[in-house]
Image (cartoon, rainbow, N blue to C red):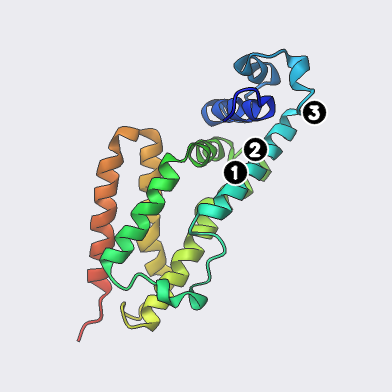
Amino acid sequence: MERGNTKQEILEASLNLFSVQGFEATSISQIANAVGIRKASLYNHYESKQAILDAFLNQVITEYEKHSIFVNHNWSENTDRLPLTADAAVKMIKAQLNYIIHDPHVSKGRKMLVIEQFKNDQLSALQTKQNYTDVLGFFRGMINGLIEKGVLEDEDSEIMTAQFCLPISEWIKLVDREPERENEVMELTEKHVRQFYRIYEPKG
């Protein structure tokens, strides 16, 4: 962030506060104090706290759609990218975990969504989309593609999808709470992915 860009400074300060105490509990005065400007000056840049949230969400969603593997991915048109081996799947998922855990906007935005999911309908819907619907849709397409190629057994793909991705989602939440456990989560993720491929590899 460039110094002197007050609008961006307001967004960054707001995100820091929203990710710790939530959107509803954060006041305009707190945001202004965090930036080091008067409350009246803040209103020269954003007309309301909702306008700050809307600007932040627009920025984060744009970045999310650029970098997240879970958005707008059509496996049927990208079968050459299917992770045909456990090694390939581990590499793909670890790369995405690094992005999800370490990108400050994505990480703080996710924490804000966790706090606000039962308070704000807009953020609740975004939480469901980004952290459930998009994730399951991506892995459902991947699992179905691997079944069609004979890499995995033809079992119930909905259950296979849940078995594959939901433990990883929970481990991300663990790292959000306890960042020092990131290495442990990476190791668990690799073991989990390799075991999944072993369990569902075609028999006979």
On screen, residue 3 versus residue 199, left or right, reads right
Q: Residues within 10 Å of mark 2 (few under 14, many from 20)?
A: many
Quickly name the residue at label 3.
47
What is the spatial separation of the Cα atoms under label 3 and label 1, in whole angstroms? Answer: 20 Å
Q: Residue at x 39, y 49 (%)?
A: 97
Quickly name the residue at label 2.
56
What is the spatial separation of the Cα atoms under label 2 and label 3, in whole angstroms? Answer: 14 Å
Q: Are marks 1 and 2 in contact (CB under 8 Å)?
A: yes
Tag 3: amino acid: Glu
Quickly name the residue at label 1.
60
Dot 3 or dot 1, earlier in sequence: 3
On screen, residue 89 versus residue 140, left or right, reads left
Q: Residue at x 48, y 64 (%)?
A: 138
Q: Residues within 10 Å of mark 1 (few under 14, many from 20)?
A: some
* Screen quadrant of the N terminus: top right
Occupied quadrant, residue 200: bottom left
What is the spatial separation of the Cα atoms under label 1 and label 2, in whole angstroms? Answer: 6 Å
